[in-house]
Image (cartoon, grey):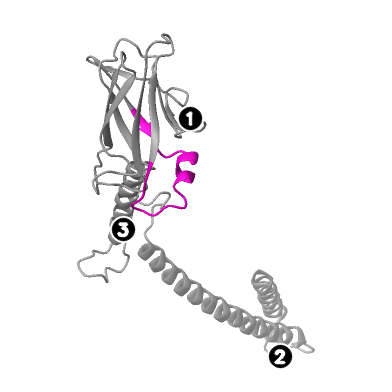
Amino acid sequence: MALTATALTLTPTWASKRLTIDGTVSVREAVAVTLVGCATDTSIVLKISSENGRVDYAKFPNLPGDAWTVAGDDLTATLSLNTDLLVAAFAQWGPDDRLDFVWTVASATNSNLYALGHKQIGNWMEDTDDPVAYSTPLADAIDAVEEDVATLEGYFAAHLHDGSASGAPRVPHGNLLDIGVNSHRAIDDALVTLTSGVATNASNISNGAASIIDHEARLDAIETAIEADTITALPASVDDTDFTDIYNTLTSVLAFVASLKASQT
């Protein structure tokens, strides 16, 4: 919302030392001041004082960097009526009350150039279109915050994961920073496959171990049987050559069984 500052036109008559002031202002306002016909002297000081002249409630220039702006034959400036002393002067007064003040303009370089006038200041804005001194920056700040909030709300609305809100799409996460090469679904599928493989391998290992134990028991039984087979007498039909062949054969079998057993351990 754009706000227009309250305007005052000050016209000094140097010869009579009179200052004519046109416009209506209130405490706390930022006032756009036009000083008529004073473009040749930017050293002029504008002051608002008590009737007895003992208290200065506001002035221009006041803060570092304050300076009149030349506008044709005139000087322009923004005068703050939001000073501590001026606000305190209205503290015990009603919202529609007005107080009298002395307004003076005086050249800092020419002691003959000064003018004085009387002007009331209201306790609040006379025109609802006129801002108090802090209204313009405050309104601008509020507008900026509202824009930021609207933007953030848009971001939040667009970032719904389940798409449950009316018209809100589900947001993919393919462009996340440091996402890696696998999607969540690929990782889940890989975990299922690995889990199944581990279970199968565990079963195979268990079955293989049982088979090895069984084979070892059988080999032990064969070895025991062979070692216990002592030949005490030869049949009449068996000659020395036959016995030697049989013995060699049994010895080979025994060695084979021993090597087979060793390879299984």
Judging by the rendered image, the residue that carries numbered circle 1 is 53
Which mark, by number, is residue 117?
none
Give the residues in magenta.
78-99
Image depth: mark 2 or mark 3 in front: 3
Which amino acid type corresponds to the residue marked 3 in the rendered image? Glu
**Tag 3's secondary structure?**
helix
Q: Nearer the viewer, residue 92 or 186?
A: 92
Judging by the rendered image, the residue that carries numbered circle 3 is 153
**Tag 2's secondary structure?**
loop
Q: CA distance from mark 1 to mark 2?
A: 158 Å
Judging by the rendered image, the residue that carries numbered circle 2 is 236
Task: Name the image quarter holding the C terminus.
Answer: bottom right
Q: Quadrant of residue 108?
A: top left
Write the residue at 25% across / 70% down.
Answer: 165
Q: Residue 65, position in %: x, y?
A: 44, 22
Q: CA distance from mark 2 to mark 3?
A: 110 Å
Write the residue at 37% across / 52% down.
Answer: 176
